[in-house]
């Protein structure tokens, strides 16, 4: 997914009559269905203060609100404050133009940009389920309902001022494996009774021998590590506010809730627990609850910061100490 940032810069006059630079909004101009794009807010300290808060909304052209949350400040070592937001493009949102709106929660600053969602062709598949797997999906079970409630509780727990580091994602499986089902497959389940239901595959499946190590693909904090009815042994890791990776059907779980992990931390092993027909890892990533293609994360940073944030500023001759003076 090529990322190109539009940088727009404006000047405005505040009530005191002096010039104040406006915050700069940079938005990735296009994203495929089931992918993601980032929003970057810079140069806001003068007008909004270092602890500025911004509301980010994602809207259709007809002003239907799809997302409404707050951006988060990034911690990257040095340089001016910068805030970011990541928007997952739901696979079923129709291709076309959409609106990103960023609004200060402190002043009257507001700005909009257009983003184009481009079509992505996702495959279809039929899956025949035997009686045991049919029952696992269709039988009413209060534990399944509690699993679902807990899942959405975690997805909606959102602390925009957690000030996280920018994560870079790598594949969570490095030992030999194959991709047994890609992201976004439109699956028709055919139950043993002949009844059918349709759902999307919200992750990517990596099939490998039971016991194959599964590693954290990026730094983060474990927000769930337990056995669930349908997804079996499950781990969830929060990487940025609202960005959560999910691991299903593990044979063993090697981390605990609230544990901080780094890229490469062993989090579990491939297994076939829960609704599974053979040993594989179901790897899913959600952004504010919206599933995105996990493999797009290996190709690009979630938020691409301009170079001047990533290297220390070079000392300027005007402030460098005089060479050789008085020695
Ligand atoms: Zn899967």
Image: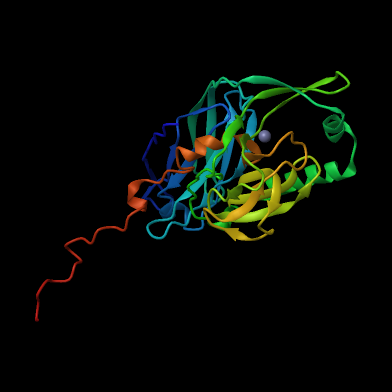
Instruction: Give the quarter of the image for residue 246.
Output: top right
Q: Where is residue 190 in the image (x, y as percent from the top left)?
A: 80, 21
Q: Quadrant of the C terminus?
A: bottom left
Residue 36 lies, with reference to residue 163, above or below; the image says above
Q: In x, y percent, where is residue 137?
A: 83, 33
Q: Residue at x 20, y 66 (%)?
A: 319
As rendered, which of 51 and 154 lies closer to the eye?
A: 154
User: Which quarter is ligand 1 in?
Assistant: top right
| Colouring used for the render | rainbow
Q: In this view, does 119 lie to the left or right of 8?
A: right
Question: How many numbered marks does the figure carry?
Answer: 0
Q: Residue at x 84, y 35 (%)?
A: 136
Q: Which residue lies furthest to the bottom in this view?
A: 327
Quadrant of res 144: top right
Residue 156 appearing in the image: no
Quadrant holding the N terminus = top left
Image location of residue 121, percent across then percent down? 56, 19
Q: Where does the image place residue 303, in percent across and percent down from the top left?
A: 46, 43
Image side of residue 184 versus residue 187, left or right: left
Q: In this view, does 319 lie to the left or right of 312?
A: left
Residue 62 visible in this rendered orientation of the protein:
yes
Q: Is residue 299 left or right of residue 183?
A: left
Q: Which of 168/26 is in front? A: 168
Considering depth in this image, is 179 or 323 the residue closer to the camera?
A: 179
């Amino acid at each position: 997914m090529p990322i190109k940032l539009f940088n727009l810069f404006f000047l405005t006059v505040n009530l005191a009559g002096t010039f104040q630079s406006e915050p700069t909004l940079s938005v990735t101009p296009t994203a495929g269905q089931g992918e993601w794009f980032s929003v970057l807010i810079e140069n806001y300290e003068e007008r909004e203060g270092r602890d500025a808060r911004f509301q980010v909304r994602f809207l259709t052209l007809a002003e239907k609100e799809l997302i409404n949350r707050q951006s988060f400040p990034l911690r990257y070592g040095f340089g001016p404050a910068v805030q970011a937001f990541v928007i997952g493009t739901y696979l079923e949102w129709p291709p076309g133009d959409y609106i990103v709106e960023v609004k200060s929660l402190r002043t009257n600053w507001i700005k909009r940009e257009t983003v184009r969602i481009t079509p992505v062709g996702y495959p279809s598949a039929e899956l025949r389920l035997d009686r045991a797997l049919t029952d696992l999906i269709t039988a009413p079970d209060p534990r399944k309902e509690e699993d679902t409630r807990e899942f959405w509780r975690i997805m909606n727990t959102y602390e925009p001022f957690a000030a996280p580091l920018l994560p870079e994602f790598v594949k969570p499986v490095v030992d030999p494996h194959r991709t047994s089902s890609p992201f976004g497959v439109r699956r028709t389940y055919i139950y043993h009774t002949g009844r059918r239901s349709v759902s999307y595959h919200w992750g990517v499946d990596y099939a490998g021998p039971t016991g194959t190590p599964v590693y954290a693909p990026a730094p983060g904090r474990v927000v769930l590590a337990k056995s669930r009815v349908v997804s079996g042994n499950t781990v969830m890791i929060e990487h940025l506010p609202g960005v959560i990776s999910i691991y299903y059907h593990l044979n063993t779980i090697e981390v605990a809730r609230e544990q901080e992990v780094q890229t490469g931390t062993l989090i579990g092993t491939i297994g076939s627990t829960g609704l599974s027909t053979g040993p594989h890892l179901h790897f899913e990533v959600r952004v504010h609850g919206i599933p995105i293609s996990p493999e797009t994360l290996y190709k690009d940073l979630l938020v691409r910061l301009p170079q001047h944030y990533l290297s220390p500023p070079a000392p300027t001759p005007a402030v460098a100490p005089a060479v050789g003076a008085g020695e």
